[in-house]
Amino acid sequence: MKTIYLAGGCFWGMQMFFDQFDFVKETRVGYANGNIENPVYQDVKAQKTGHAETLKIVYEDDIHLDELLNYYFEVIDPVSINRQGEDEGSSYRTGIYYVDEKDLPVIQKKIEEIQKNYIQKIAVEVQPLKSFYDAEEYHQKYLEKNPGGYCHIPRELLTKYK
């Protein structure tokens, strides 16, 4: 198994989107790469902690990271700075946070490939994972529990690959 952390705006939709793939074995929503320990949602949303709403994805080795990143770029606006859909602020920034140094060249190559499709600079930050804290339990699988909840990802994409 491999693990990658993807920040793509609201983590609820990111979780529902990636949960539809058989190669994804586990997802957890949480807060990554901030500057305090054990942040709480209200402080993250208020941009007091430096964290990004992030999805932890544990996936099978036989899926290539390049393919997983293709799906990621399908559901984000990669040139938007600190905003996805109606969600705005640094906690909604986009980012790819890796734990395996061998993933970095794959990530960089994908960013270069995606950049060719845009005039504006890609705004997805790429960094090693510094910290990740699980979000409160009520955020886990939130859109399954609250089907009418807001998400910037179009509803048809949340089940497109089932």
Image (tube, rainbow, N blue to C red):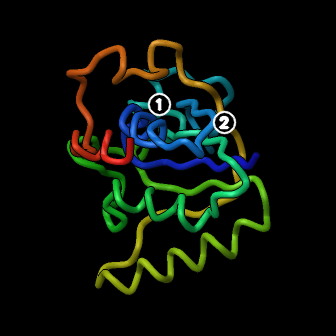
Report x, y in % for residue 59. 65, 45
Q: Is residue 51 visible?
A: no
Q: Is residue 26 left or right of residue 81?
A: right
Q: Quadrant of residue 114 in the image?
A: bottom left
How far is the residue under mark 2 from the one under mark 1?
13 Å
Q: Against 29, is 121 above or below?
A: below
Which quarter shows the C terminus?
top left
Q: Is residue 131 left or right of residue 81?
A: right
Residue at image position (47%, 82%) is: 113
Report x, y in % for residue 137. 52, 13
Residue matched to label 1? 44
Residue matched to label 2? 132
Closest to the observer: 123 or 106?
A: 106
Disc 2 is placed on an element classified as: strand
Closest to the observer: 22 or 145?
A: 22
Closest to the observer: 66 or 124?
A: 66
